[in-house]
Amino acid sequence: MAKESWLTQFPEMDRQDLTAIKKGLDGAYREFSRSYGEVIESFFDPLLYFLVWFEKLLLETPWWIVIIAVVGIVHLTARSVKLSIGVVLALCLIGYFGMWDNTMRTLSIITVCTLVSIGLGIPIGIMMARSNRVQAIISPILDIMQTMPAFVYLIPVVMLLGIGKIPGVIAVVIYAIPPVIRLTNLGIRLVDKEVLEAATAYGANKSQRLWGVQLPLAMPTIMAGINQTIMMALAMVVVASMIGVKGLGQPVLKSITNQYFTLGLFNGLAIVALAIIFDRVSQAYAKRTQRHLEGTH
Amino acid sequence: MKCLVGAVIVLFGMITSGQASEPCGKISIADMNWSSATLIANVDLFILEHGYGCDAELVPGDTMPTTISMMEKGEPDIAPELWSNSAREAIDKAVAEKRLRIAGSSLSDGGEEGFWVPEYMVKKDPSLATISGVIANAKLFEHPEDPSISGFFGCPAGWNCQTSTAHLFDALKLADAGFEMVDPGSSAGLAGSIAKAYERGESWFGYYWSPTAVLGKYKMVKVDFESGVDFDHFTTCTTQEECENPKATMYPPAPVHTITTEAFASKSPAAFEYLSRRSFKNAQMNTLLAWMEENQAEGDVAMEEFLNNYESTWMPWVSSEVAMKVKKALAEL
């Protein structure tokens, strides 16, 4: 073999130095989790209690009450008989095929994840829209959140918070929050300058312009972002189950390791059904609010 | 021109036939996706390459896909660490049909499974080393999500051990003691939960297996079920999906084999002989795995560490002539 030189072989860092860096960072993280883990864990306790309570509520309520409640919400937001019938059918099929409990668990965690994502995402999107500097800082962070393979941050989160719902929620939110932030930012930035000028001319102050002009006009885009967030949260359910989140993800995992094709398909379809319910409801709701806006034009 | 092409073809033919006539030839070794198997695969790669003149390469593998591929396609040639319980019938059949050959035990103690608690808990209260002690102190083992009940960390979703863990959970009446089975979802989740508990000195009770880096790094005590090993019951009931009255039994050691294709075994008897002798003790493997994790070492680095520092272990596996060749190649690294 020819002698290796820096021309033929990339001049790599010394193996020992590399090991030292890896060991140092790992050690620092371990130290961090040892000293702050409990504090951080207790910070999330209220969320955990809410998650546990909400899951128990969904599981312990008789199935027909849950269906009535879900359809009630669907009908109030979407006002579509066809959609409501579809939801009843989908939920009944899920229950008939024995996936009711897991679907309720997934429903509870996805609802919480979506609410957290929207609650955090829209304000961040508004901040981004108002300042180019904030946008320059947050954009690359969003890129990381969307592309970093989930397991890279899942295991550190598990070391910090243990396995179960909280790390699951964190993982799902990290993955699902970027669309709502990006599209809130985009929607507000796309509002016509003339419209804003007109609002200023009528004497609207900053917050009046935001609530009365920018947000309503950006609503279709923001709703599209919320939609994407919900879809991504549901897609993440399987990955979250790898750190002990109960729900539809676990049977899917089981079917992957054992090649149980049908089991995987059924539970996958139940996830799809949930996604479609969430999607249609939020879209119908958005369309309804927009129609109302068009009427006042 | 034609003449030249002809010459090239003849030359090429000579080169390839020259390679084929080497004592061992081209072989592939399955590099399974867990640390101990990677280490063994790398050790085999180095020794077969430098000691036996094989043209060896590593190919990625996993228990079931590798077993099936070896049986059906005759590739890869060697599975260095196969937990054969999971595919026992298929392997037995393939051995009978002369498609596979069992070279020996990669882990002489066999794989060790059981329910474990951290050593520091047992030091504080020695009764926790037995299942009755654990049940009496069930309150200690807090469930990660619900403080009112106790948590038992089970086997990851979809793994074979899920069946046996569930049956033993019933047999030991852990549910009556207030335990709930927590599904960690993946082996990474299970290992993460041990690491978290250990770093903070918290309680932990659950299923794990050895040899693993986790048990090399975090000292755990295997809980005694006070039942002994009932091998027949374990194989006919505990590990089967349908098991009406599971009884308590400790896990018998799981056989861990080195398996080769029949073609390789008959082609290279010397190399096969090495594989049949190559075997690790669990304690030593745990130490090596902990070293790997400590130093973030990949299989090839760990192989160097092992061959350099554990000569008394590997020298007896090979003839002194081969050992010299391997040592010489090692010095050149």
Image (tube, grey):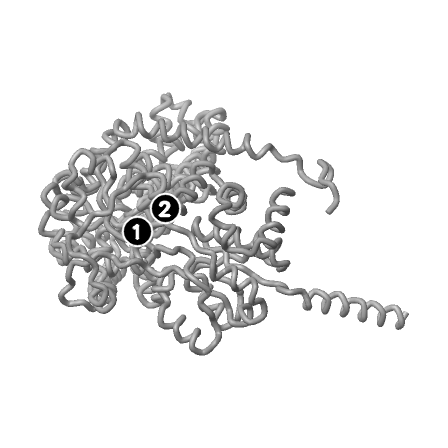
Q: Which mark is residue B240?
A: none
- The amino acid on which the numbered mark 1 sits, given as a three-letter code, is Phe
Label 2 SS = helix
The residue at 33%/41% (across/down) is: B192
Residue A63 vertical placement versus A158 (above, below) = below
Circle count: 2
Q: Residue A55 appears at what percent x and percent y? A: 19, 47
The residue at 85%/69% (across/down) is: B7
Q: Nearer the viewer, residue B174 or A123?
A: B174
Residue mark closest to the camera, 1 vs 2? 2
- The amino acid on which the numbered mark 2 sits, given as a three-letter code, is Ala
Q: Residue A152 appears at what percent x and percent y? A: 43, 41
Q: Look at the image and tell me in which quarter the C terminus of chain B lies.
A: top right
Label 1 SS = helix
Residue B51 vertical placement versus B260 (above, below) = above
> Along the horizontal axis of the image, is A92 left or right of A24?
left
Q: Are marks 1 and 2 in contact (CB under 8 Å)?
A: no
> Along the horizontal axis of the image, is A102 left or right of B105?
left
Q: Nearer the viewer, residue B7 or B40?
A: B40
Q: Nearer the viewer, residue A182 or B40?
A: B40
Q: Residue B130 appears at what percent x and percent y? A: 16, 46
Picture quadrant of residue A92: bottom left
| Distance (Cα) linking label 1 and label 2 | 53 Å
Q: Look at the image and tell me in which quarter the N terminus of chain B lies.
A: bottom right
Q: Tell me if residue A291 can be seen.
A: no
Q: Tell me if residue A35 can be seen.
A: yes
Q: Nearer the viewer, residue A18 or A270?
A: A18
Chain letter, disc 1 residue: A
Picture quadrant of residue A151: top left
Residue wearing tag 1:
A278
Residue wearing tag 2:
B283
Seen from this angle, which residue lies furthest front? B320
